[in-house]
Image (cartoon, helix red, strand yellow):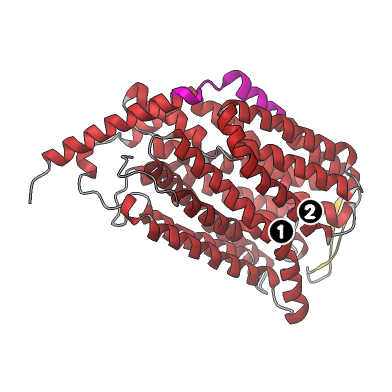
Amino acid sequence: MPETKPMPKSFPWLYFFMNAGQSFGLALAMTYLQFFLTDTAGITPVTIALILTVSRVVDFIFSIIAGPIVQKSNGKMGQFRSWILPCVILVQLGVWMMFANPNIAMSAKVIIVGVGYILQNAPMNFLVTANNGLMAKVAGPSMDNRMAVAAKTMQGMNFANIIVAMATLPLINMIIENTGMNGFFIVAVVYGLIQISTTLVTVAKTKEYDQYDPNFKAIGGPSVGQIYSQLLQNPMVWVLLVINILSMTSMFGVAPLGMYYFQYSVKNIGMQPVSMTIMSLVSLGAAFIMAPVAKKVGKKNSAILSGFIVACGQMGIAMFAHENVWFYIAMLALNGLGAAIVGVIGVNFWLDAAEYQLYKTGIDTRPTAMSMANVPMKIGMVLAGPITAAVMTASGYNQVLDEAGKLVSTSMDNPQMFVRLLGFIPATFSIINALIYLFFYKITDAKAQEYATENQKRMNEKMAAAAAAAPQE
């Protein structure tokens, strides 16, 4: 990933808006999918867990192979830009399929949801890898540049989350009430077009930094086997894998259930957008405030502090939030504050681990290492299915269907148990993660800078040698 020219000051803002667009594009799938499939499409939680688990296994395979494919590519639009826009379009096709809810047999509907889920997530592996690779390519070896882009990435996501929180559910309800149409699907299409548009701008604006390189093969690079071998021998990659698997399992198993809290525990679903708005405002403010804090205390200390703050918020939910919606919102805000501390670091943990490996061995695994950030997400999604189903079952969630199999009503027998599980599960995972960072993560920020600077120097020397050896026209 050679440095072509200094990073422009506008580049972090490109990632701000691109990731804001991504928040729009994935908002419904991340927040409302479980609720939509049970309470609108009429699919049982057990069936949802089954189809999503199967789909996530397929998605996991793509998460493994995406890194080396992108790393070894040399497309006409550049190593990374060639992947970004096509993958965004495929992702949105998948989202639209999941929320289409056609009037067809339930078995066919389940298949469409499963295929849509794969379409949303499989290309996402290539998209995230390419986005991260482009970031590292433009930012160069500077830790300050990398942190600046990572911070703007999170700030952009939280900025969009505020709008999403305030507008999404009212917009969906307005469409349903005034037209009788599928408001979820219509909003998904609009949000998807926002993501495609912001991505197109970023691809266009970064043209001079990532272009087709005629000397790409001459520079040489590791084989796929070497890439995976080096990653598997990197102890810091294993530490990050364990931490992020726990984190993603918690997030995908519990976070989507928040909608049920408002429906069945406090019986005021209108507070859901209020909660999302407040949490997003806190997260946005924290993303700006905590960026210099994370830079000052370092990545490792940021992660430890983040884990314990998040755990406090989740424990508060478990113990005191049943039927107290404002306390629930306050604890979610605390959770957002804690998450922002490590969130502004972004993928830089993985990049530091790969810089260390390249420095020690001379084998470049950086794009693939950053793609490994997707792997815990996929494993977490698979593990989250049974957790979600278990929480719903333990809470006594019921669906009543008529003779034709259409949904008549839903209820929850034990909402207090539901809230306890909603808090205790992620709190436990957050504490474990903080302890793992404390005792097992070893790369300091100073060492990471040393590795990155030396690696860039070596790469520039290879580029110069390859250009000198190339036939002159």
Residue at disc 2, secondary structure:
helix
Residue identified by numbered label 1: 165
Instruction: Confirm whether the magenta stretch covers residue 118.
Output: no
Q: Residue at x 31, y 26 (%)?
A: 362
Which region shows up in magenta?
431-447
Q: Of helix, strand and loop, which one carries label 1?
A: helix
Placement of 49 over or under 429, stated as above or below: below
Left or right, 244 with respect to 210, comes to: right
Q: Position of residue 157 (x, y in %)?
A: 60, 52
Q: Give the quadrant of residue 99.
A: bottom right
Q: What residue type is disc 2 on?
A: Ser
In percent of width and height, residue 406 lies at 78, 69
State the residue in front, 179 or 460: 460
Instruction: List x then y, in percent, for residue 141.
Output: 39, 34
Q: Which quadrant, please, contains the N terminus?
A: top left
Q: Are marks 2 and 1 in contact (CB under 8 Å)?
A: yes
* Res 291 → quadrant: top right
Which residue has dot 2 on it? 275
Q: Give the CA distance from mark 2 to mark 1.
A: 8 Å
- Direction top: furthest residue: 439
Could you tell me residue 228's position as x and y percent?
Answer: 40, 32
Residue 167 lies in what quarter of the image? bottom right
Q: Residue at x 47, y 54 (%)?
A: 14
Res. 8 in view: yes
